[in-house]
Image (cartoon, helix red, strand yellow):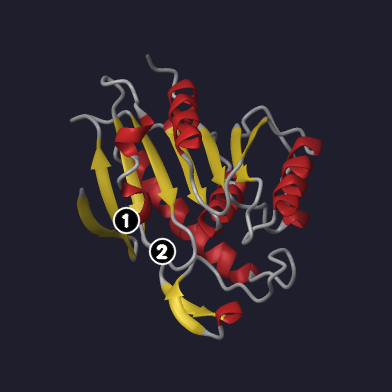
Amino acid sequence: MTPKKVNKLSVIETETAAKPTASVIWLHGLGASGHDFAGVIPALELPTGLGIRFIFPHAPEQAVSINNGIIMPAWYDIRSDRFDDNEDASGIRASSQAIIKLMQQEHERGIAYECIILAGFSQGGAIALHCGLHYPQQLAGIIALSTYLPQTDGLPDHTKDSPSILMMHGQSDPIVPLALAESSHQQLNKAGYNVDWHCYPMEHNVCTEEVSEIGRWIKTRLDQG
């Protein structure tokens, strides 16, 4: 794993082959870091010949209102325990722009946009959805884990180039309520998006079965093996 700084975001990079042909940009949750998911790659059980550059960015540190203004790694401020209430629109946009710069960098390094997957857990998943759905280039897909769709009023219309979406959630999630995730799923379906939805008997975390499904989905989206 190689720590580096890209466009003011510190990131961890891991390549599964000498010359990657695809990229997965994976965003962590509130108060965590890129290290949270950096160790997941072997558990995905991807084909040996599938060359992927995994990028795990660290969110900038900022005050989080719901946590009494404590400064911590966060993609945007959370002002209410109802995540879709009084949203930090400027913070969501700023983090989305930072991730767009990472995608553009990958394109400059020779990775086609349609071979880029955005993934994220919790708050990171919200940014992955917002960024991926608003980006004009066709992406390989979006992986949204234990999260919800922010800024729903600005949801773009579905087109033939819209990314496929993998949404996964815990049935007993005490942080991001299942009802909120299901509502996001329904909104995406209503707008015509292709959403692969999975629910697991877990709380606000990731389980073994989920990781296995993520690996299968990545393999399918990148048309390899």
User: In the image, what residue occupies the spot 54% across and 34% down?
Assistant: 138
Classify mark 1: residues with Cα within 10 Å, few (<14), some (14-19) or many (20+): some
| Quarter holding residue 78 | bottom right
Q: Please tell me the numbered disc located at residue 35.
A: 1
Q: Where is residue 201 in the image (x, y as percent from the top left)?
A: 61, 42
| Residue 63 as seen in the image, left or right of residue 193 | left
Instruction: Residue at 44% x, 18% y: name it.
Output: 223
SS label for mark 1? helix
Q: Which residue lies furthest to the right in this view?
A: 190
* Frontmost residue, 211 versus 164: 211
**Amino acid at dot 1:** His
Residue 62 picture location, percent across and down: 46, 78
Report helix, strand or loop for mark 2: loop
Identified at 32% across, 37% down, the residue is 41
Q: Compared with residue 81, is residue 133 higher up or lower down, i.e. above or below?
A: above
Q: What residue type is labelled 2?
A: Ala
User: Is residue 110 among the parts visible in the rendering?
Assistant: no
Along the viewing direction, whichever of 3 and 83 lies nearer the viewer: 83
- 217 shown above or below 201: above
Using the image, tell me which numbered label, if any, was put on residue 14.
none
Q: Quadrant of the C terminus?
A: top left
On residue 32, which mark appears? Answer: 2
Q: Is residue 2 visible?
A: yes
Q: Answer yes or no: do the residues labelled 1 and 2 have beta carbons within 8 Å?
A: yes
Q: Where is residue 121 in the image (x, y as percent from the top left)?
A: 51, 51
Q: Residues under labels 1 and 2: Cα distance? A: 8 Å
Would residue 219 be found to the left or right of residue 11 on screen?
Answer: right
Where 150 falls versus 142 (above or below)?
below
Give the residue at the far top of this rendering. 225
> Residue, x 26% and y 47% (percent of image)?
13
Residue 150 location (% of width, % of height): 67, 57
Exactly how many numbered labels are in the figure?
2
